[in-house]
Image: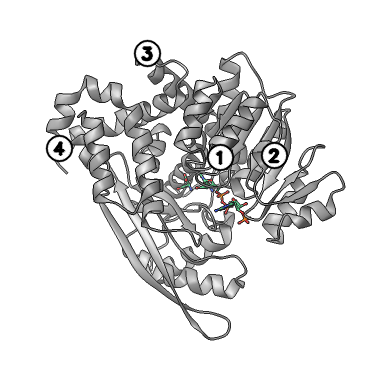
Amino acid sequence: MSYVDEVIERVIAKNPAEPEFHQAVTEVLDSLRPVVEANEELYRKNAILERIVEPDRQFKFRVPWVDDKGQVQVNTGYRVQFNNSIGPYKGGLRLHPSVNLGIIKFLGFEQIFKNSLTSLPIGGGKGGSDFDPKGKSDREVMAFCQSFMTELCKYIGADVDVPAGDIGTGAREIGFMFGQYKRIRGMYEGVLTGKGLSYGGSLARTEATGYGLLYITDEMLKCNGESLKGKTVCVSGAGNVAIYATEKAQQLGAKVVTCSDSTGWIYDPEGIDVALLKEVKEVKRARLTEYAAARKSAEYHEGKGVWSVKCDVALPCATQNELDIEDAKTLVANGCMAVCEGANMPTTLEATAYLKENKVYFLPGKASNAGGVATSALEMSQNSERLSWTFEEVDGKLQQIMINIFHNLDDAAKRYGMEGDYVAGANIAGFEKVVDAMLAQGVC
Ligand code: NDP
Ligand code: 2IT
C-alpha cells in the first residue's frame, strides 16, 4: 500500500467518528501523491505525514452560562492547535450547533495549508463551540463569550495562538471575548483578530475574505483569458463572506443573482441589493424573507436551491458540503465555467471530481478564502507595531497576496505536470513550506 493510503487508513481508524476530518485529510493527501512519491524515503523516515495529521494538542472544555430566565446552560468549547511550524497557531472560532471535534479538526487541518499559502508567518488552529448565537439576547451572548474565554485564555496569546471569527462569531462576539481576556490576563495584546476599529482592529478585515475571494477569482479568470465583467454569479450564504463577495463581484462588473441562509434562498434577477442585504443580516440579524419583503424583484424560496440557477461563476460561501454531486451536475449542465470556494470545504469530494472532469475552473477554499486570515495576520502586524494602516494600504496588500497565491498554486501544479489542477497546486504549495520548516526543526 502507498504511504498516502496507509496514512489515510490510519486517520480513519484512529478517529472513527470524524467524517469531515477524514474528508479534508483525504483531499489533501490524495493530491500530494506526486510530491510524496518523489520524497518517500525522507518523509517516511521523518514520519512527516503521520505528524501533519496529528494535532499538536486539542482542548475540550465545559462552558456554563446563565440565560435570561436565570437557567444555567452548558455548552462544549474546543480549541485545536494543529501545527505551529511556521508561526503561532491562527484560525477562527465557530459558534454553531453542528460544531463537534471532527469539524474543528477538519477546519484546523485545512488552516495549516491555507495559512502557509498566505506567505505570512502563521500556523494552523481552529476552535469554537456548539453554542447557537441565533435568537439569543446580547446579554446571553456576552455571558457565553465570557465563560468561553475564561477557559480559552489559558491556552492563547499574541505569540502563541490567535483566534478570530468564523460562522457565528463576528465583531460582537470578538469584542466580548477580548474584554474578558484582557480582564483575566491583565494584558492588552493582539490576542484575537477581527477586533473593532476602536481597540486594535484592522481596516478591511471585515471585507477581506469576500474581497479576497473575488481578487483571486478575477486573477484566475484573467490568466485563462476570461473576465468577471458581465458574468452572472451565484453566491450562497448571507453572512460575512457572502456579503463582501457579492459587493466586490458587483464592483468588478458581475451580476450576483442569489444568496441564501440556513432556511431559504433568494433569486434576484436584477442583482442582489448589497445595502439591503447588510441591513437585514448585519443590523437586524433577520431572515432572508425580510430581504424579499423589501425588494420587488426578489423571489424567496424555502430550503436549498441556489445552484439550480443558471450562472457563469458559482461562489459557495455558507458552509461545508453545501455543493454536492447533483448540484455539480446542474451547474455543468447550465454552462457554469468556474467554482471558487468562499467557505471551507463547501464542495463534496465527488462534486469536486465531477467539476474537474468537466473542465470547470475550480479554486479550493484554502486558497480562495485565504484573504480573511491573511488580513488577520496584517492585523497582528499592526498590533505589534502599535500602528494602523489605511484601508487602501491593507486592501492593496490583500490584493497582492491573493494574486501571489494564485500564481504560487498555478506554478506548483505545473511543476508536477498537473497544469490547471488548482486543488493539487494549492495543497502542494501550502504543504512544501510547512514540511521544509518541520524538517528543519527536527523531531517535534
Ligand atoms: P457567517 O456566520 O457570517 O455566515 C454564515 C452564512 O452561512 C449564514 O448566512 C448562515 O445562515 C449560512 N449557514 C451557516 N451554516 C449553515 C448550515 N449548516 N446550513 C445552511 N446555511 C448555513 O459566517 P462566515 O460568512 O464568516 O463564514 C462562511 C464560511 O466561510 C464558513 O465555511 C467559514 O468557515 C468560511 N470562512 C470564513 C472566514 C471569515 O473571515 N469569516 C474566512 C475564511 C473562511 P444563517 O444566516 O441562517 O445563519
Ligand atoms: O477559516 C478561516 O480562515 C477563518 N475563519 C479566518 C481565520 C482568521 O484567523 O482570521
Can residue 160 be seen in this snapshot? no
Q: In the depicted view, which residue is nearer to us: 188 or 375?
A: 375
Q: Rounded to the nearest whole Å, what is the CA distance between mark 4 and mark 2?
A: 46 Å
Q: Rounded to the nearest whole Å, what is the CA distance between mark 1 and mark 4?
A: 40 Å
In the figure, is residue 283 to the left or right of 44?
right
Note whether 382 is above or below 399 in the view shown: below
In the figure, is residue 370 to the left or right of 15?
right
Q: In the depicted view, which residue is nearer to us: 440 or 29?
A: 29
**For mark 3, does the 10 Å Cα neighbourhood hold few (<14), some (14 to 19), or many (20 or more) residues?**
few
**For mark 4, does the 10 Å Cα neighbourhood hold few (<14), some (14 to 19), or many (20 or more) residues?**
few
Name the residue that disc number 4 marks.
442
Which labelled disc corresponds to residue 323? 1
Q: Are marks 4 and 3 in contact (CB under 8 Å)?
A: no
Q: Nearer the viewer, mark 1 or mark 3?
A: 1
Q: Amino acid at mark 1?
A: Leu
Name the residue that disc number 2 marks.
247
Identify the residue at horizontal 39%, vertical 65% (top origin).
77
Placement of the C terminus among the 4 image quadrants: top left
Q: Nearer the viewer, mark 1 or mark 4?
A: 1
Note whether 245 is above or below 278 in the view shown: above
Which labelled disc corresponds to residue 417? 3
Q: Are marks 1 and 2 in contact (CB under 8 Å)?
A: no
